[in-house]
Image: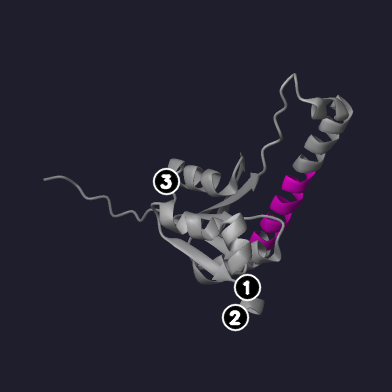
Amino acid sequence: MEAVNLKKKEPKIVVAVDESQESMYALSWCLANLISQNTTANLVLLYVKASPPVYSSLDAARYMFSSDVIMALEKYGSEQVNSVMGKAEALCRKLNTNIKVERIVGSGDAKEEICKIVGKIKADTLVMGSHDYGFFKRALLGSVSDHCAKYVKCPVVIVKHQKQI
């Protein structure tokens, strides 16, 4: 007879974060409602930055961007990632001390990258904030949360900010 492993697996919860107050609200909601103070959990903070533009050798716009400007833009992007992640980690420490926090930074289209990373790390739950774009903005830009809710294989929790309720 085979022994059964009764040790409970720590859930892996991914929270997509960005510069918005909606994503920080979703993180605080997750910490208050999905993660108990008495249990441990693996929390993954996922930030997706836009891909830098690619220029061909024949592209005249490339000549407008010196290597100094490109380096400054890359530095700004890194600082932005660190700022958002730092704010998110501070919120985690403030609201719950029993969680293991991991950072993942992706690059590319947010919709596609979030789905890819969540699948790759085999997340148990994805938590996202809702920007609550109106019909026209959502039709033009597409909704990251709608896309992820359709294509991610794990449960997706979309948290509306209180001002949207």
Q: Is residue 100 visible?
A: yes
Real-space Cα separation, disc 3 to disc 2, in angstroms: 31 Å
Indicate the quadrant containing the C terminus: top left, top right, bottom left or bottom right.
bottom right
Q: Are marks 3 and 1 in contact (CB under 8 Å)?
A: no
Please check the rendered image and state whether residue 82 is part of the magenta-colored stretch, yes or no: yes
Task: Specify the principal SS of the magenta part.
Answer: helix
Estimate the x, y position of residue 52 in percent, counting from the top left.
71, 35
Amino acid, disc 1: His
Q: Residue furthest left?
A: 1
Q: Which mark is residue 165?
A: 2
Real-space Cα separation, disc 1 to disc 2, in angstroms: 7 Å
The stretch in magenta equals: 79-92
Amino acid, disc 2: Ile
Q: Crowding at label 2, few (<14), some or many (≥20) Cα neighbours within 10 Å?
A: few
Q: Residue furthest bottom?
A: 165
Amino acid, disc 3: Lys
Q: Which mark is residue 161?
A: 1
Labels 3 and 1: the sequence-earlier one: 3
Indicate the quadrant containing the N terminus: top left, top right, bottom left or bottom right.
top left
Q: Crowding at label 3, few (<14), some or many (≥20) Cα neighbours within 10 Å?
A: some
Estimate the x, y position of residue 61 in percent, counting from the top left.
81, 30
> Does dot 2 land on a helix, a strand or a loop?
loop
Residue depicted at 63% across the width and 55% down the height: 17
Between 93 and 31, the one lying in front of the other is 31
Q: Which residue is mark 3?
A: 122
